[in-house]
Image (cartoon, rainbow, N blue to C red):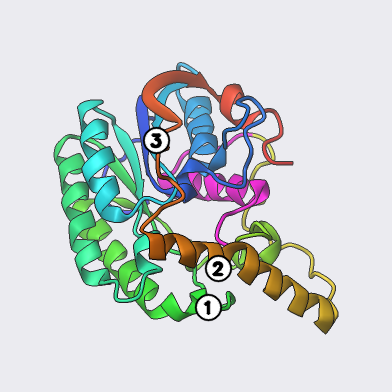
Amino acid sequence: MQPGSDRRTWRRYIALGDSFTEGLSDPDPGRAGEYRGWADRLAGHLAAAAPSGAVEYANLAVRGRLLPQVLAEQVPVALAARPDLVSLVAGGNDLLRPGADPDQLAADLEAAVVSFREAGADVLLATGVDPRQTPIIRRTRGRVAVFNSHLWSIAARRGAVVLDQWGAAWIQDARLWDAGDRIHLTAEGHRRTALAAAAALGVPVAGDDTDWRALLEPAPALPTREVVAQELAWVRGFVLPWIGRRLRGRSSGDGRAAKRPTPETVTASALTGSAPGR
């Protein structure tokens, strides 16, 4: 665990961010039409570790949100709720855009981290995943790397905790990512990320859910024709619609509200289930 609080249990956890924290591509079996995701699963692990067996949890993340929107819309709400733990993971959508300034993004993010730390909350940050294996998106690799470097420096200065996704070998397996858009984790990917976050925070996890670092068995090589077909399907199904929304000034999150806007008392079984993601 990075410098900061030495707590291993928390009372109120609030998650902030975009689609990654909203949990896209991890359907919630208990909430029709909603997603579960790593933050919900982490809240379950926090509840399991708490003496009361429960934790108060809110998830303010909304898909498509840019960092300035997260800072303007979600941070004040989270501060008003007086959490003792927040996860603040944002900036990925900004970095996808040409001309994004990772230095300014990091400076703006740090100001929010300072606000939470001064209010007595512990802060969990997360580096971006290395996009080297993703066509088109790998063009952002340099910007993501600079932003990630800032995150480690912010954590050292402010006593925050960092979930290191850039250095996670297992997360590079394409089978842990939604085949349709390639930027959202599958249920198994979210399960592993929640366990990685718990480990970063020093939260003990009972049972056999300690396999998150393990690499999957090698996948059989696909015929070239199938690889090309998948690439074309990805461009048609995700890249072109994404470009179209950008040109129209639209976002996938337009008109959407947070899925868990206020802290509610939840238990481990309510959020992780008996066998999460399996």
**What is the secondary structure assignment of the residue under circle 2?**
helix
Q: Where does label 2 land, which residue? A: 239
Q: Considering only vertical position in the picture, is 98 above or below 257? A: below
Q: Position of residue 249 (x, y in %)?
A: 36, 58
Crowd band around label 1 with a 10 angstrom C-alpha radius: few (<14), some (14–19), many (20+): few
Q: Residue at x 37, y 23 (%)?
A: 263
Q: Considering only vertical position in the picture, is 100 above or below 65? A: below
- Amino acid at the residue labelled 3: Arg
Q: Position of residue 183 (x, y in %)?
A: 55, 60
**Viewer-proximal residue among 44 and 246:** 246
In-image side of 7 versus 105 (left or right): right
In this rendering, the label closer to the viewer, 3 or 1: 1
In-image side of 18 versus 228 (left or right): left
Distance from Cα at disc 3 to Cα at disc 1:
40 Å
**Which residue range is magenta in the image?**
183-206
Q: Are marks 1 and 2 in contact (CB under 8 Å)?
A: yes
Q: Where does label 3 land, which residue? A: 8
